[in-house]
Image (cartoon, helix red, strand yellow):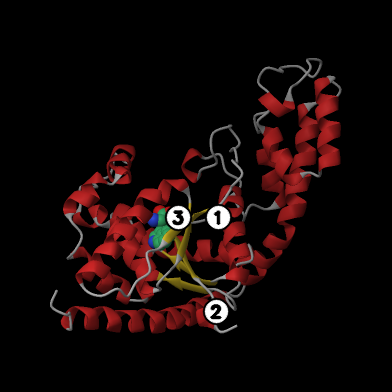
Amino acid sequence: MSKQAKQRILSGMRPTGKLHLGHLHGVLENWKRLQDKYECFFLVADWHALTTSYERPQEIPSNKDEMVLDWLAAGIDPDRATLFVQSEVKEHAELHLMLSMITPVSWLERNPTYKEQQQHLKEKELATFGFLGYPVLQAADILLYKGHKVPVGVDQLPHIELAREITRRFNYLYKDIFSVPEALLAEVPKLPGLDGRKMSKSYGNSIFLSDPPDVVRKKISAMITDVERPRMGDPGDPENRCIAFKLHRLYLPAEQLEVIVSECKAAKRGCAACKKELAEAIIRKMDPIWQRRKALAADPGKVKAILADGANRARKVAQSTMAQVWSALWNRNAK
Ligand code: TRP
């Protein structure tokens, strides 16, 4: 099958540093599956990170390197997918500029994540032009590669909707050169953090892909279980009340889960031992990822080369799209 016959996927992540199990099960495993069926472009959205971290931009490069190590360790394959850094393909800025000409400010002000994030990140001054234009930059990311499908989480749906509106407006005003991109929502397991809230770096409740076995053991041993079961002699209710059991479900085989449920309900199993079993199961599952990560971290030249090659591949596509964009504008047929 020729490459053109495959639909394109474009997705990206802001470089926030080390990734955790939530990213692994929520995003990376999905990306990994998509590599088989689609021509994939995965971008490190460092300019997007700048919209909120412009006061500490120096942290972005190392965050970017840690994140790419995690991508590769998790099985994102640079021979099949194009992995690259947004700021290394300047066409992202060029298309962002062009699309900003046709994007009404009111569309951006209506974007729910714009207001939410300003509330959420109160300590930062986010009433900036760049932050308002965040979704325009994201639309540029997608359109440069003519992405058909955009795998994202639900939180990103308003941005994809805006990208769709901007695409339609471009096609209507100039020339129908873009297919309207579609969000691809994956079914993701809800992953609790160590304290029962959603696993998130900012909550300090995460297990990172780069955590060595002993750190995993320590973190899991401190994890919340069933708060209504203070003593081992009390019968538990793992399926409805235990936080740790949500992870057991993800990492242990069904037969073992059955044993745990019946022993816990009969007050024949303590939480400490139960969490030890969980930690060992996580460690077994993570082992190949750690091994790959360690090997890659020891060879920084290799990761650099992967990203340089990715940027070259991405740039070719991006330049060809930009040629079509400018041609559509300068040769616009009178309507
Ligand atoms: N905005 C996305 C996020 O915060 C990251 C991102 C940047 C992205 N460009 C993209 C996602 C293009 C999908 C497509 O998570």
Q: Which residue is mark 1?
A: 27
Residue type, numbered disc 2: Gly
Q: Quick one: label 3, few (<14), some, or many (20+) residues within 10 Å?
A: some
The answer to whether residue 262 shows anywhere in this view is yes
Q: Earlier in the sequence, mark 1 or mark 2?
A: 1
Position of 237 compared to 308: left or right?
Answer: right
Asked whether disc 3 touches disc 1, contact meaning CB atoms under 8 Å apart, the reply is: no
Q: Amino acid at mark 3?
A: Thr
Which numbered disc flags the more N-terminal residue, 2 or 3?
3
Above or below — where is 104 with respect to 335?
A: above
Q: Is label 1's Cβ within 8 Å of ligand 1?
A: no
What residue is shown at x 18% (from left), y 56% (from top)? 104
Mark 2, secondary structure of its residue: helix
The N terminus appears in which quarter of the rendering?
bottom right
Please tell me how crowded label 1 is: few (under 14), some (14-19), or many (20+) other residues with Cα within 10 Å: many
Which residue is under mark 3? 16
Q: CA distance from mark 3 to mark 1?
A: 14 Å
Q: CA distance from mark 1 to mark 2?
A: 26 Å
- Where's residue 181, x and y in %? 40, 63
The answer to the question of whether label 1 and label 2 lie on touching residues, with beta carbons closer than 8 A, is no
Residue 253 horizontal side relative to residue 313, left or right: right
Residue 332 position in % (x across, y down): 17, 79
Give the quarter the ligand 1 occupies.
Answer: bottom left
Q: Residue 127's spot in the image, x, y percent?
A: 20, 47
Percent from the top left, x then y, of residue 196?
58, 32
* Residue 275: quarter of image: top right
Residue under label 2, please give it.
Answer: 301
Q: Nearer the viewer, mark 1 or mark 2?
A: 1
Toward the viewer: 49 or 1? 1
Q: Are marks 2 and 3 in contact (CB under 8 Å)?
A: no
Q: Residue at x 48, y 50 (%)?
A: 153
